[in-house]
Image (cartoon, coloured by chain):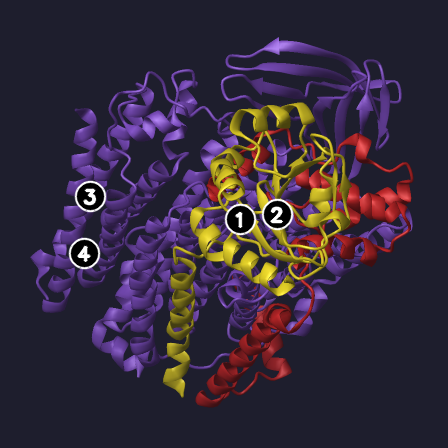
């Protein structure tokens, strides 16, 4: 009964979404305030209804109601409660419902926090949000309904895939989806602006926090996914240029370009049509990513729903959403004119360079991901595009991005002084040179590119810190005064420093990986192995009983010289019910290096396969991601986004048109 | 059925402790072994679709790793050893696609996009310099006095 | 001209959407991998027999043959087994089996239970012959012509439609050409 209630709530949500997508739009066109206001209440009601549906499905998982097909297929009474709940989005239907839930959440947030928005703009934004909701709710109800029942009711579920019972995997989709879906707000603002034919500084100021928040969520989502792969897959890989990973990377890159170009709109009232295009493309790439994963067009480990009917439905949505918005763009964007002078050597010039490079990066990932499919469709040869391609194309593109990242923030708006900026960066350059030369001196036969990558990361980090030090006048005024300046620095500026520092940290972490060391071999009890100055000794392998598995647990003593560093316990788990074996790695993580141990099968002589890695500063890769997201969050807390500030900035309409001509 | 089988293989591939290269596969000669590992990271495991044979623990990946090592031990060059595998499974196994007419757009696409984007940005910049009247630059004296003014204001 | 630039994103997307439509066609299988061995000479192999005589490539010279890679652990193989039985009994197809990565006992049990459609079966315990043929998943079926060249490959279990429309015609053509 409760399940039908959820089903009903979802149908009702669709009806409300239809109202939300039409009434405010007509109201905005005819200038009827009451009609426009419908958008707000509809968005809030729709959110409530989808939340009810989500809650009902979650309830079905918690009480293990196996009369619901979705629960029977994806849950089990033996699952811990936590994984019962996260199992809701561990499957196609549930993840689509999560998608719709996030979308309704974003719409409701727009409705709730947009008191200062002009009524017509808000009505249009909410209407566009409503249209997207209609598409996805209809998709769920027509092809992926999680509330369908089954009879006879199975005695237990068969969803106990041990691989999916993992904290990293549990939180990865919500963040990723929040990021994907969050960009729908920037998309809706863009479409609304195109309908109105009006973009100004205030528009940039409204779009940026939404994009920034989505970007933070996407950053965390991608980092979590990468971290999950790292500790799960048993050999410490963390990025595979897998099509599904690329599908999340592309909106991230374009979204990064968007949060930068929106600054130019806000500060200089130019690059407007480009920023609108970026906002449309960012969300479009989120949709395309969803299509590629859900339709089975991509062959990938991650694609758990392979169903052409769903693919056809999503393709229809894509054509309407992306095709529609881009057609609108083609018709309306030429009329949007940017403001006056734009010097190449200036802050805005640097941001333009950032956009040129990031757009190329995104296009490269897009090309590499879809090219094999294109060739296949025109009956060309079957090829694969993997990591070596991206290392040769994407990675070189990151070099100018990083070089410019240190310089750009040093340039003033309107007209910067490149020479002066470079002079201020001499320390960063010296630090990078010292690192590169030092590494060449210390190591022999080390990969040259890795060392150059380290140098580049150090250059960026020092450049970013120099800019910050200049701002707070570190060592040029008394420390107390510097501290005062640091505390009162605009949050947006501090956020930028953190965000850029995060990138530098990640780059340094990635560049250090070719220096990893590996041990792979059979070890009997008492055997010793050497790895990067550490001694590993296999002390024992015990049979341990878990809640729904038995495991071989190794005890490996790690020593350095005479000192005990750690005792680590990698496991090899066997799940009888599924007849499935999984490995559980043991990682001693540190800021300096990770010791990564995994145990595999025994051989005929009773020796165990042991795989051990020493991975220098590998945790910096994800730490950098967190610092980036923290930077975004700090920037979001800047007071100029707060309620009421943006309101005063918007000029009366008449003036705006005059300025636009 | 085929898709199901592949899906199953993928699931199993995910589920097993993905200890890719087994110790007994390794060659005694560290130089040859290093070459084999290096080559392995550029070859795709066909049944797992998105893993290299170096990472995959699928049976087929194991077979290809073994074949690769056999060829290296027999004295093949890197190119010859890879060719032995391409002869059997096609260019699909190469994660770094070869440059031929069908992949021209793949390899030169990024460069082309960069040129177009940079060209577009440059054209746009020129237009926006023309449209606006260039401001008269400050003289050095003016700049210096402005700087002192600004610094006074800041501190 | 200026307008065209703004229409460019929409045009690019139209191209992309057109491709996606192609990719969603029901007969399009993104996983399908054409064999590179077609029209090449089959790799040399010589396998011990499951029951008596072994099989080798050179033993097949003279007439078209069909070689089926199978295994007792392979579930889809059981799916196509009745079809293979029919091919052998009704159509008198020269069908040979290669038991891929399997133990002879298990294979014998399988053939004992479901019937043996093969004129002879070679045991490829370590999968080496399969590797040379470019097998990436059983069952796979190869058609060899009289000169020992591979003319056709089927991946996955054979279907009745494939047999009618592809396998039988090519066999007729090959034996017609030989006589």
Residue C65 on image: x %, y % = 63, 50
* Residue under numbered circle 3: A46
Q: Give the quarter of the image for residue A543.
A: top right
Cα distance in 3D space between marks 2 and 3: 38 Å
Label 3 crowd (10 A; few <14 / some 14-19 / many >=20): many
Q: CA distance from mark 1 to mark 4?
A: 32 Å
Residue marked by disc 2: A240
Q: Determine crowd level at label 2: few under 14, some 14-19, many 20+ residues with C-alpha closer than 10 A.
A: some
Indicate which disc, 1 or 4, sits on the residue closer to the N terminus.
Answer: 4
Task: Report if residue B90 is visible in the image.
Answer: yes
Return the disc, 2 or 3, that comes first in the chain's sequence. Answer: 3
What secondary structure is found at the residue carrying circle 1?
helix
- Mark 3 and mark 1 in contact (Cβ < 8 Å)? no
Q: Nearer the viewer, residue A377 or A122?
A: A377
A208 or A565, which is in the foreground?
A565
Name the residue tied to disc 4. A21
Nearer to me, A223 or A416: A223
Of badges 4 and 2, the one in the foreground is 2
> In the rendered structure, are the residues bearing label 4 and label 2 in contact, judged by CB atoms less than 8 Å apart?
no
Vertical position of residue A123 compared to residue A147: above or below: below
Mark 1 lies on residue: A245
- Chain that is coloured purple in the picture: A
């Amino acid at each position: 009964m409760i399940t039908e209630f959820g089903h009903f709530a979802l149908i009702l949500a669709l009806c409300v979404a239809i109202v939300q997508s039409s009434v405010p739009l007509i109201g905005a066109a005819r200038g009827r305030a009451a009609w426009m206001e419908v958008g707000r209440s509809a968005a809030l009601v729709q959110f409530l209804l989808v939340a009810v549906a989500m809650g009902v499905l979650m309830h079905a998982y918690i009480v293990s109601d196996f009369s619901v097909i979705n629960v029977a297929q994806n849950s089990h009474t033996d699952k811990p409660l936590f994984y019962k709940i996260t199992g809701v989005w561990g499957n196609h239907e549930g993840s689509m419902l999560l998608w719709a839930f996030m979308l309704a959440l974003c719409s409701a947030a727009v409705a709730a926090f947009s008191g200062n928005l002009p009524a017509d703009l808000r009505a249009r934004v909410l209407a566009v949000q409503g249209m997207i909701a209609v598409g996805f709710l209809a998709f769920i109800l027509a092809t992926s309904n999680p509330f369908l029942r089954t009879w006879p009711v199975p005695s237990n579920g068969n969803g106990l895939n041990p691989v999916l019972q993992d904290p990293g995997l549990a939180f990865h989709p919500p963040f990723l989806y929040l990021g994907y879906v969050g960009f729908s707000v920037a998309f809706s603002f863009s479409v609304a602006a195109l309908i109105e034919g009006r973009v100004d500084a205030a528009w940039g100021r409204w779009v940026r926090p939404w994009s920034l928040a989505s970007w933070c969520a996407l950053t965390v989502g991608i980092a979590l996914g990468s971290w999950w792969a790292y500790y799960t897959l048993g050999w410490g890989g963390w990025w595979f240029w897998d099509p599904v990973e690329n599908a999340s990377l592309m909106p991230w890159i374009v979204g990064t370009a968007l949060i930068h170009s929106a600054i130019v709109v806000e500060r200089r009232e130019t690059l407007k049509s480009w920023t609108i295009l970026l906002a449309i493309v960012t969300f479009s790439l989120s949709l395309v990513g969803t299509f590629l994963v859900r339709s089975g067009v991509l062959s990938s480990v991650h694609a758990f729903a392979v169903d052409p009917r769903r693919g056809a439905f999503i393709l229809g949505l894509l054509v309407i959403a992306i095709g529609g918005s881009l057609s609108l763009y083609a018709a309306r964007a030429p009329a949007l004119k940017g403001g006056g002078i734009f010097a190449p050597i200036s802050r805005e010039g640097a941001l333009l360079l950032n956009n040129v490079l990031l757009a190329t990066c995104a296009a490269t990932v897009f090309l590499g991901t879809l090219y094999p499919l294109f060739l296949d469709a025109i009956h060309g040869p079957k090829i694969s595009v993997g990591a070596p391609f991206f290392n040769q194309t994407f990675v070189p593109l990151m070099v100018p991005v990083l070089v410019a990242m240190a310089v750009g923030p040093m340039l003033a708006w309107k007209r910067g002084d490149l020479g002066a900026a470079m002079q201020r960066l001499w320390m960063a350059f010296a630090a990078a040179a010292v690192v590169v030369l030092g590494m060449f001196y210390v190591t022999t036969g080390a990969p040259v590119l890795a060392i150059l990558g380290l140098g580049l990361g150090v250059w960026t980090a020092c450049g970013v810190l120099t800019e910050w030090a200049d701002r707070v006048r570190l060592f040029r005024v008394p420390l107390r005064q510097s501290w005062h300046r640091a505390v009162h620095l605009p949050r947006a500026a501090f956020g930028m420093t953190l965000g850029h520092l995060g990138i530098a940290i990640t780059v340094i972490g990635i560049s250090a990986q070719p220096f990893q060391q590996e041990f792979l071999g059979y070890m009997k009890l008492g055997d010793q192995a050497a790895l990067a100055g550490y001694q590993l000794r296999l002390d024992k392998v015990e049979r341990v009983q878990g809640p729904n598995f038995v495991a071989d647990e190794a005890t490996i003593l790690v020593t350095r010289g005479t000192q005990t560093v750690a005792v680590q316990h990698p496991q090899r788990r066997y799940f009888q019910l599924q007849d499935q074996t999984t490995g559980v790695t043991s990682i001693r993580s540190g800021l300096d290096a990770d010791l990564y141990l995994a145990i595999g099968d025994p051989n005929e002589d009773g020796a165990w396969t042991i795989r051990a890695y020493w991975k220098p500063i590998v945790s910096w890769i994800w730490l950098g991601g967190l610092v980036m997201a923290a930077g975004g969050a700090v920037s979001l807390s800047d007071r100029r986004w707060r309620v009421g500030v943006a309101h005063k900035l918007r000029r009366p309409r008449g003036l705006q048109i005059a300025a636009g001509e | 059925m085929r898709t199901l089988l592949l899906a199953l293989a993928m699931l199993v591939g995910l589920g097993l402790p993905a200890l890719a290269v087994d110790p007994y596969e390794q060659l005694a000669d560290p130089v040859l072994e290093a070459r084999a590992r290096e080559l392995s990271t550029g070859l795709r495991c066909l049944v797992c679709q998105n893993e290299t044979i170096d990472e995959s623990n699928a049976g087929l990946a194991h077979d290809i790793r073994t074949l690769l090592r056999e060829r290296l031990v027999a004295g093949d060059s890197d190119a010859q050893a890879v060719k032995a595998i391409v002869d059997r499974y096609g260019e699909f196994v190469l994660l770094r696609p070869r440059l031929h007419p069908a992949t021209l757009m793949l390899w030169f696409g990024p460069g082309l996009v960069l040129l177009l984007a940079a060209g577009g940005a440059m054209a746009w910049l020129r237009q926006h310099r023309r449209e606006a009247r260039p401001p008269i630059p400050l003289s050095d004296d003016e700049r210096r006095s402005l700087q002192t003014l600004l610094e006074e204001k800041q501190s | 001209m200026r307008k065209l630039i703004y229409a460019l994103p929409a045009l690019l997307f139209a191209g992309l959407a057109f491709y996606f439509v192609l990719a969603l066609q029901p007969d399009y299988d993104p996983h399908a991998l054409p064999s590179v061995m077609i029209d090449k000479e089959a790799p040399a192999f010589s396998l011990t027999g499951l029951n008596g005589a072994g099989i080798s490539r050179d033993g097949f010279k003279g007439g078209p043959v069909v070689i089926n890679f199978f295994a007792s652990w392979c579930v889809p193989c059981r799916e196509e087994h009745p079809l293979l039985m029919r091919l052998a009994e009704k159509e008198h197809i020269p069908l040979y089996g290669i038991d891929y990565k399997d133990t002879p006992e298990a294979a014998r049990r399988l053939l004992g239970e479901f019937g043996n459609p093969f004129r002879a079966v070679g045991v490829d315990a370590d999968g080496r012959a399969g590797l040379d043929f470019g097998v990436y998943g059983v069952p796979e079926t190869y058609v060899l012509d009289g000169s020992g060249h591979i003319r056709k490959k089927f991946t996955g279990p054979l279907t009745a439609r494939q047999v009618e429309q592809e396998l039988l015609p090519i066999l007729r053509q090959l034996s017609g050409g030989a006589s």
